[in-house]
Image (cartoon, grey):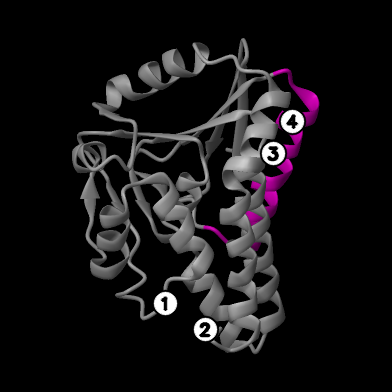
Amino acid sequence: MAKLDLQLKDKVAVLTMNEDDNKLNLDMCNSLLSMLDRVERETEALTLVITSGHERIWSNGFDTDWIEARLAAGDKATVREFLSRDLELRRRLLFFPLLTIAAINGHVFGGGAVMSCCCDFRFMRADRGFFCIPVVDRQFPILPGTAALLQSVMPFAVAEELVLTGRRFTGAECAASHIIAGAYPNNELMDRVMAFAAGLEKGRWIIGQMKQVKNGRVFKLMEEDLEYIEDGKVKV
């Protein structure tokens, strides 16, 4: 099975992640970026849905085993390259000239949860799966751009609870807390998402323009995240 799969249904592109638990490492980020380029350049889609082929996991976030192996080998350059490409993935999603929907059909943790927040809309299965950003338990400080992103897509108090407690939110709790647009049983999730996506059909030019304004401040702060790492304020 391919790492990523792309299907088109009328004006909706569906990107399915099929890589084990869809952890983010350098290869995964590059693959996702290539697929976003393909959607933009080779299709006439107006909406992009990102989902998972894994029955229980949308994305388990950063591939910490891969990162730790690179660091143990003294290969900090590759880890920094990964962080740069992850930042580029966030930029592409934030400014992507199509409306984007994360169809979260399982657990979503850490960097995977942050990636979902770079999408314009999030829907989640109600019967299984947690939304969690456990940076406090990983002893990793929240970075300026990540904090700004979370505060832009959910109520401030909810974003604070997510990062300060590492609480695991169920799909129903995410819906009640306005982290996501809706939670549905897994056997209904994709039908609901596809119906929502099909009803959007907004032009690429206006969506791109609106995102430049809406998300520009957040991404400017995200660029500072790498500076924090380079300056040694956060250790890698």
Mark 2 and 1 residues: CB-CB less than 8 Å, in contact?
yes
Q: Earlier in the sequence, mark 4 or mark 1?
A: 4
Q: Secondary structure at mark 3?
A: helix
Q: Earlier in the sequence, mark 2 or mark 4?
A: 4
Residue at position x 37%, y 70% in the image: 135
Residue 88, percent across and down?
68, 55
Q: Residues within 10 Å of mark 4 (few under 14, many from 20)?
A: some
10, above or below 95, in the image: above
120, above or below 68, in the image: above
Residue at position x 29%, y 39% in the image: 178
Instruction: Provide the residue designation for mark 4.
Output: 40
The reply to whether the magenta stretch includes residue 26 is yes
Q: Dividing the picture into quarters, in which one does residue 81 lie?
A: bottom right
Instruction: Provide the residue designation for mark 3.
Output: 35
182, above or below 174, in the image: above
Quadrant for the N terminus, please. top right
Residue at position x 69%, y 46% in the image: 33
Three-letter code for the amino acid on which mark 3 is drawn: Met
Look at the image and give the residue range highlighted in magenta: 24-44
Q: Earlier in the sequence, mark 3 or mark 1?
A: 3
Three-letter code for the amino acid on which mark 1 is drawn: Pro
Instruction: Provide the residue designation for mark 2.
Output: 234
Three-letter code for the amino acid on which mark 4 is drawn: Glu
Mark 4 and 1 residues: CB-CB less than 8 Å, in contact?
no
Q: Secondary structure at mark 2?
A: loop
In the image, is 106 to the left or to the right of 230? Answer: left
